[in-house]
Image: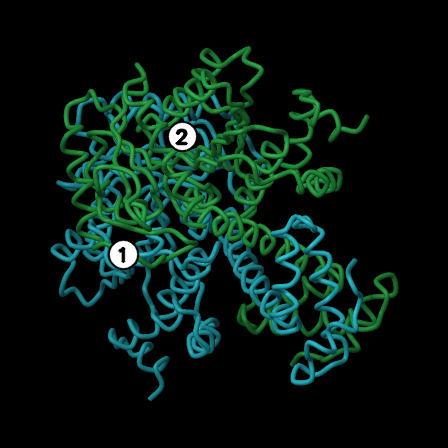
Chain colours: A green, B cyan
Amino acid sequence: MTLVDRVMLGDRLALARLLTLVENDTKDGREALSLLYPRTGQAHLIGVTGAPGTGKSSLVNRLALHYRAEKARVAIAAVDPSSPYTGGAVLGDRVRMKDLAGDEGVFIRSMASRGALGGLSQATAAIVQIFDAAGYDIVFVETVGAGQGEVDIARLAHTTLVVEAPGLGDDIQAIKAGILEIADILVVNKADRPGAENTEKALRSVLELAHTPVTADRHHGRTMNVAAPAGSSGGTWLTPIQRTVALDGQGIPELAAKISEHRAYLMSSGHWRDREQSRISSQVEGILQQALMAQFHAALPKRRYNEIMQRVFDKHLSPSEAVDLLVSAAAVSDASVPPSVTSEGRASRGRRPQ
Amino acid sequence: MTLVDRVMLGDRLALARLLTLVENDTKDGREALSLLYPRTGQAHLIGVTGAPGTGKSSLVNRLALHYRAEKARVAIAAVDPSSPYTGGAVLGDRVRMKDLAGDEGVFIRSMASRGALGGLSQATAAIVQIFDAAGYDIVFVETVGAGQGEVDIARLAHTTLVVEAPGLGDDIQAIKAGILEIADILVVNKADRPGAENTEKALRSVLELAHTPVTADRHHGRTMNVAAPAGSSGGTWLTPIQRTVALDGQGIPELAAKISEHRAYLMSSGHWRDREQSRISSQVEGILQQALMAQFHAALPKRRYNEIMQRVFDKHLSPSEAVDLLVSAAAVSDASVPPSVTSEGRASRGRRPQ
């Protein structure tokens, strides 16, 4: 039986192995992804992002338990882009294990950065597809931190929760305006702490300041609106704010209800499809970029590449002049020459720089 | 007189305009960059990163004032990747303006995300080069947040400061292990607050836990070591920890001294050159990636591209199958046909999918 068959039969060990193959972008992983791709498109992808200290992991745990009580199967991709080298499990995992361990309906995967720019976002997209195809109804994509990378990853989701908490330092306001724009639902977690009222007020005023009601979409079929009591109104989504206390579960059923409302809104407005397509387009562009780079490096002998780079290091060529040269050198090497015949000698017969 | 000439003569308005051209990746901007490139390589690039609330902006201000007192010219690129749409000035700027306004030896540039993945990192690299060529001795690259994007940007620098502060939430420990690995110098800012002692202890133990002394470089000529009182020891750099209170300037001269020591270490060890080359290589790769994408899109008619994408949306093709098809379709369209002759008709005579 193939690995993909075993994954489809619910074999968790096979799933874990497949995720590793996919994360490492192996040939087997890519083939499995292609096989599984037609089965994707069912899961509700929920992105959860926000600054450190807001209690995102606990919140995701609680939501997972809530969905488990409704018999939904839940997968969690916990992405930690701030850990570029070490990899391995983050602190939150240990907490998580206690609550969700031994539940066959939950699968948790921690991911660190893949090093290359955009690599993590691509790996996450692929892993989410595997979960989707493997029959998980709810897939959380949880990111530590709140930088550009996290925003890009949050964009993978159908529904993005931005989590805030009272009393998290003074320049946090500066960050909000940007991060709020990706929020479908704002969560004030740790709402039993002093200052929760103020945090909510601040969020509400940032929303109101930044935006008057809009009807047209601005990005990927997303609408940005003034804060409103809750949910959708006519054709637009009015970003609601929900207070929660993840530690004891306060506000979790209400948050889950808002997530359902958002799903219903996406479906009825056609934005579900828009977001699917925008996500898939980004994924294709990412793979395409990799493929073009691979093609380029296969066409241009490494020695020629290093030669040109040395001239950049020596300041005889600027980076963009070097790129012009590299691109034409690769084109000359490549043109009507089978890869096996491409050689340094052949390449240097092309357009000579300087 | 050209814009570049005016920039070289110290015209601030011209500099601001050139930065905009470069940030927007215009043709004029790229040409100016190529002209200025041979003059780069003099500035000391100092990356400053850390979680929100650690007081990075105030710290950079204080350091800037310190360097100004030594007559060095200082430029600051303040990067806010968490603000993907709004752009504009961040909160820290207003504070900054008060301290540094009217000083001709300081230039501050705020940058928001360029949208495209990797775009911000490339734009920052370019802007840093302009500052370098324009004769700024010290160039700060300050990033808000601590995600992957910020880490990538911090890697632009010769010397990277990671800023922490006491009492910033409970899951911050989880983040540290990763972000610490890029730190050349650790700063505990707001060191007059309760808990500074504990923050420093925690940092020290994370450093000690994660690493036994190493002599070999692990990444881009960087060494990761156990914490040590200060500075370099033989051939390796022992990441020091410096306490500061940016608001009143405590610890700033000591921090500046450690920055100088790090520069001396980079120079004597050859890592200065390694970091320069690694930075320039990344820059070339980024521009190359863009160029290859542009070449691809020029070669393949938009209609053909959309056709293939539609089949992916319909789940008849997986993303990686689509990329194989796109790449060969573009190659067929492109082969020995001048761009002006490339047409849909010509493209569809190529390898037919399905």
Q: Quadrant of the N terminus of chain A?
A: top right
Confirm whether residue A68 shows in the render: yes
Q: Is residue B51 above or below residue A210?
A: above
Circle 1 SS class: loop
Q: B249 or A2, which lies in front?
A: A2
Q: Residue sitting at 73 percent across and 40 percent down?
A: A35
Residue B146 lies, in percent from the top left, at 38, 40
> Callout 1: residue from which chain?
A
Residue A254 lies, in percent from the top left, at 30, 26
Q: Which residue is mark 2?
A: B176
Mark 2 or 1, closer to the camera: 1
**Identity, as a three-letter code, of the amino acid under mark 2:** Lys
**Identity, as a three-letter code, of the amino acid under mark 1:** Val
Q: A186 or B171, which lies in front?
A: A186
Residue A214's tag is 1
Q: A94 or B319, which lies in front?
A: B319
> Callout 2: residue from which chain?
B
| Disc 2 from disc 1: Cα separation | 40 Å
Residue A201's tag is none
Confirm whether residue A316 shows in the render: no
The 10 Å Cα crowd at callout 2, few under 14, some 14 to 19, many 20 or more, is many
Whether marks 2 and 1 lie on the same chain = no
Q: Residue sitting at 67 percent across and 42 percent down?
A: A38
